[in-house]
Image (cartoon, rainbow, N blue to C red):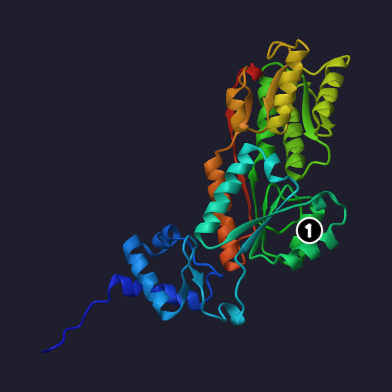
Amino acid sequence: MKKLPQRLSLVSQAADILREQLVAGLWGDVLPGERALCARLQVSRPTLRAALEALRREGWLEVSQGRRRRIRQPERGRRGVPRSTRVGLLTPVPLHRMPPFTMFWVDELRERLGDEGFELALHVSHAPGLARPERWLQRLTAEAPSAAWVLFRTSEPLQQWFDARGLPAVIIGSRFPGIGLPSVDVDYRAACRHAAGVFLARGHRRIALLLPEGGGAGDQASEAGFMEGCRGTGRDAVATVVRHDESVAGVCRRLDSLLAAAEPATALLVARSAHALTALSHLQRRGVRLPQDVSLISRDDDAFLDVVVPSVARYACDAAAFARRVSRIVLQLARTGSVPTRQTLMMPSFVKGETAG
């Protein structure tokens, strides 16, 4: 009987593509999840499973009950060295102390990395607060080699260390001048410039910005934008930047000093949503009416502010959009080892709460 040419089945084509990617060392020791692979190959789950079963029979994959498929082929990747499947998240804030907005993008990043066969490893340390963190960083990167590093709330020396060594890293937050690492953050400079304009438009002339001591590049950008906004209108505004030690008592002490001044501040822009909540409750405890006596805007937003009364005026960034942007950059960095070094700034929206009048 005469044989006719046959079209390659979708299963065979999917298996061929996966095999090429395994040979190229695209992944580490674990294959991405089925959902991610279906999206990558644009095939259905039954087709993908048939292709994976073919690869398992060839000895490429090892399947364990309740676990992801492990890659068995040795000597993968560039120069025969398997790539790491770990992504390190370096943060001075332990997981249980992270604000909801941060927890959201961390959870999203963890899930997206897991779909692609990577794991997110959290490293909590006070090294970002050290003037010379080199020794600790050298030990960490040697003991926990990672395909990419995510730097959250990092100091200038720490950013400089990663930048100088060319390690694959992305800053979640603002980067300091001269740093060549990619970064993703809220546009604090624009937000604080806008906040100053809101206060001035409502007749305030004694305006204060409350920032944590030793703040990072984002706080520096906030101060710059705040001062630009106060100077930009040409009005006779008195702008003050007040720093606190991030404790509840420290925030309250700074507020008391502002209220006790010969010409007390009538408008407050407060960085960090938790500190804005402290300021709101302390002012109410002292009998200060908002916004009749003092107008207040929070530079940042978090879910708990949705249930606070009076409603807090604030700047809200789309958490889902922020998480997607972070995940996309980190995944590209983990896969390829490099991404464009641009600074990505997301402009938040102003939420007109009752505290700003």
Mark 1 is on which residue type? Answer: Gln
Tell me the crowding category of disc 1: few under 14, some 14 to 19, or many 20 or more residues within 10 angstroms, Cα based: some
Res. 233 visible in picture? no
| 48 horizontally vs 286: left or right | left
Check the image and report above or below for 283 versus 83: above
Residue placed at 62% from the left, 27% from the top?
305
- Please provide percent x and percent y for residue 254: 84, 25
Instruction: Give residue 270's quadrant in the image.
Output: top right
- Please provide percent x and percent y for residue 78: 59, 78
Total count of labels: 1
Quickly name the residue at label 1: 160
- Please provide percent x and percent y for residue 94: 72, 45
Nearer to me, 63 or 181:
63
Check the image and report above or below for 247 versus 39: above
Res. 344 visible in picture? yes
Q: Quadrant of the N terminus?
A: bottom left
Check the image and report above or below for 332 versus 20: above
Nearer to me, 85 or 165:
85
Q: Quadrant of the C terminus?
A: top right
Instruction: Give residue 282's quadrant in the image.
Output: top right
| 328 horizontally vs 13: left or right | right
- Determine the secondary structure under disc 1: helix
Residue placed at 77% from the left, 29% from the top?
209
